[in-house]
Image: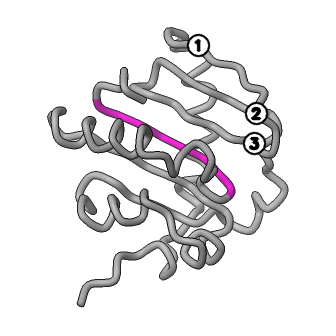
Amino acid sequence: TRQCVRYLDIISRQLDPPVLNTPEFIDAIQQVIVKKHRPRIRIIVFEPDTIARHGHHLLDLAARHSSFIELRKASNEFHGYNEFLLVADQTAYLHRNHATRYEATANFNDRRQSKFYLDNFLTMWNLGSPDQNLRPIKI
């Protein structure tokens, strides 16, 4: 994520708290937002109510930078999807076949495989929807 220049796309069931809710990851996302020109961060989740109930620093960051970070709930037709995916700049990826295991394949320069993952991501993104649990609460 620290190497990300502009685009970051993530699919995660519950925003993987041991990885994505760490100060290092949140700082890396914030650096992309602050230092890059027109960044775009899109995140698909499956269990937004669980994420909101337990709290997540990424939700706070998304509330402060809603122009750059968008979260959607996956459509019910992808209910059985149990993978983790992170694609950076349409070139680099980190993919886990089983979201509950921390065994992954990563490549920092593979446009072809990244395009394959992004095509799947876009299908899920286009069928996904905003969820009230992922929206910032402004008082």
Q: Residue at x 62, y 31 (%)?
A: 117
* Residue 16: x %, y % from top left: 63, 50
The residues colored magenta run 6-13
Q: Quadrant of the N terminus?
A: top left
Q: Taking 90 as reference, is 123 above or below it? A: below
How packed mark 2 is, by other alpha carbons closer than 10 Å (few <14, some 14-19, many 20 or more), is few
Q: Taking 86 as reference, is 5 above or below it? A: above
Amino acid type at image mark 2: Tyr
Earlier in the chain: of badge 2 and badge 3, it is: 3
Earlier in the chain: of badge 1 and badge 2, it is: 2
Amino acid type at image mark 1: Asn
Where disc 3 sits, the SS reads loop
- Quadrant position of residue 74: bottom right
User: Which label was assigned to residue 83?
Assistant: 3
* Residue 25: x %, y % from top left: 44, 40
Amino acid type at image mark 3: Glu
Q: Which residue position holds label 2? A: 102
Q: Which residue position holds label 1? A: 107
Q: Rounded to the nearest whole Å, what is the CA distance between mark 1 and mark 2?
A: 16 Å
